[in-house]
Amino acid sequence: MVGMTSDPGTAASAPIPARDRILRTAQDLFYRQGIRATGIDRIIAEAGVTKVTFYRHFPSKDVLIRAYLERRHVAWMAWFRAALSSARAAQPEAERREAPLVPVLDAARAWFGLADFRGCAFANTVAEAGEAALPLAGIAAQHKHEVRDAIAALLPPTARGRAEIAWAATLALDGAAVNAQFGEASAAAALDGLRSLLDALGSRPSLP
Amino acid sequence: MVGMTSDPGTAASAPIPARDRILRTAQDLFYRQGIRATGIDRIIAEAGVTKVTFYRHFPSKDVLIRAYLERRHVAWMAWFRAALSSARAAQPEAERREAPLVPVLDAARAWFGLADFRGCAFANTVAEAGEAALPLAGIAAQHKHEVRDAIAALLPPTARGRAEIAWAATLALDGAAVNAQFGEASAAAALDGLRSLLDALGSRPSLP
DNA sequence: CCTCATGTAGACAGGTCTGTCTACACTGTC
DNA sequence: GACAGTGTAGACAGACCTGTCTACATGAGG
C-alpha cells in the first residue's frame, strides 16, 4: 500500500518517518527560538537523522522554512477554527447574535495561554527576515487572509460590512498577539485591550 | 570647554563622534536587516571605525542592542508625538471632539509610508530574540506603555475609560503595523482595518 | 540478481560570527 | 614631559553556520 515505487500525479501523500521527524523538530525550534537562531545541525541532532538524510529531503534551509510555514499554517488554522467554533458553541443564543466576536477573545485567551506561545509565527518570521522578507511576506499575508475568513464565518452572512469587521478583528488579534509576547502581565493587558476592540467592533449597544 | 579630563558626578553628556556614528549605523542596519542578520563587522565597516574603538564603546553586541532600542525609543516617540499633534492641529474643531483618534490613523499612514518602514522595531526585536527575549520584552512593554500615553493625550482628560481606549488604540496600531510589513497592498489594507477599529473605538458612547 | 530509494556515520570546506590581541598615533591636562 | 583618553590598522582565536563529500547498510520491486 505504501509500496508504490514512484507515483507521479497527485504528489506525495505518503508520510516518510524521517522527513516528518525533521519537520516536527524544525517546527518546534523555529517557533521557539527563531529561524536564524536555529541551526541545521541542531535540527538534525534533535530529529535523530543525519545530514545526508536531511539534505535529501530539504535541499536548503530556505526550503525547510517554507515547509515549516506551510505546515504551521495548516495546523494553526485548524486549531483556531476549532477554538472559535467550540467557543461559539458555548455562547448563549442571545449573545451569539449580539456579540458574535466573543469567540475571538476566547480563542486568543487560549492561544496566549499555551505554554510555548511566542506570538504569530508568520509575523515573527517576516520580522526576522528583514529586507529579505518579500517572498515570505506573501505567505504571511495569505495566512492573515484566511484568519479573516475564519473570523468572518462568525458573522451572519447578511451582516453589512462583514468582511471589513472581520478584517478589523484580525488586526486587533494581531496587535494583541504582539503584545502578549512581552510577558504574562502584557498578555493579560493584551486580552483586555482586545476585549475593548472587539466590543467596540461588535457594538450596537451591547452591554454586560 | 569639552576639556574636563574626567568629570565624575553627572555622567557623560558629551557626545563622542565615533560612538555616535556606530549607534547611527547600528540603528539603520538593525532596523532594516534585523539584529541577528547584522554582524558587528558590518557595522564597524559602515560606521568607519575599528574594532578596538567599537569594543571600547560597546563591550558586547548585547550592550549595543540595548543602546539601539533606547535611542530608537526616544527618536520614535518624538516623531510619533509630533505626527499626532500636527495631525490634530489640522483637524476641524468638531471632528477633534467627536473623533479624537483620527490623528492616530494619520500618523500610521505617515509611518507605513516611510521608505524604510519595517514594522515596530521593538516587536521585531522581541520576535527575533525568541525564548531569550525576556529582558528585551520589558523594554518593549514599556515602549508600548508610552505609546498608549501619547495616544491618551488626544482624549479629553475627563473621558471615561480614557486609558482603556488609548490602550485599545495602541493594540490596533500594532496590529496594523504588523500587517503593513507584508507589502504595499497589505499596508493599504492595514490602514483600512485600522480606520475601522479607531472609528469603532471613537464612536463608543463613553458616557460619564 | 540487481538496482534504487532510503537510511546511517561523520569528515570536510569555506564562510561568518563575536570578541581579544598587539602596536602605534594624536591631543589636551596635570 | 608624562599621562590618560581616544583614535587607527589589522591579525587572530574559537565557535558556529550551511552545504558537500565519501563510504556503507538495508529492503523492496523490476
Image (cartoon, coloured by chain):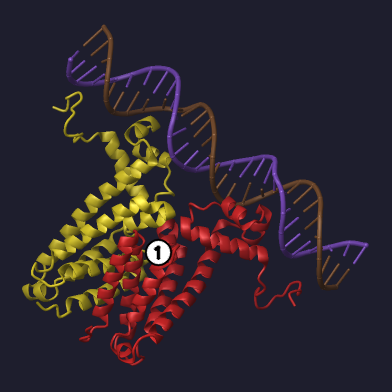
Chain colours: A red, B yellow, C purple, D brown
Is residue B58 in sight in this rendering? Answer: yes
What is the quadrant of the C terminus of chain B in the image?
A: bottom left
The residue lying at 57 percent from left, 52 percent from top is A42
- Horizontal side, residue B10 vs residue B37: left or right: left
| Number of other residues with Cα within 10 Å of mark 1, as a class: few under 14, some 14 to 19, many 20 or more | many
The residue lying at 34 percent from left, 64 percent from top is A180
Answer above or below: position of B84 versus A173: above
Q: Chain of mark 1?
A: A
In the image shown, does A150 or D18 lie closer to the viewer?
A: A150
The residue lying at 16 percent from left, 71 percent from top is B161
The residue lying at 22 percent from left, 36 percent from top is B15
Secondary structure of the residue carrying tag 1 is: loop
Q: Position of residue B144 (x, y in %)?
A: 26, 59
Picture quadrant where residue D2 is located: top left
What is the quadrant of the N terminus of chain B in the image?
A: top left
Answer above or below: position of B45 versus D26: above
Q: Position of residue A195 (x, y in %)?
A: 28, 75
In the image shown, does A144 or D14 lie closer to the viewer?
A: D14
Amino acid at the residue labelled 1:
Gly
Query: What residue did someone put label 1 on?
Result: A119
User: How many numbered marks, from 0 up?
Assistant: 1
Is residue A130 in sight in this rendering? Answer: no
- Horizontal side, residue B164 vs residue B51: left or right: left
Q: Position of residue B36 (x, y in %)?
A: 43, 49
Answer above or below: position of B51 versus B192: above
In the image shown, does C23 or B58 lie closer to the viewer?
A: B58
- Horizontal side, residue B103 vs residue C3: left or right: left
Q: Position of residue A194 (x, y in %)?
A: 29, 72
Picture quadrant where residue A55 is located: bottom right
Picture quadrant where residue B197 is located: bottom left
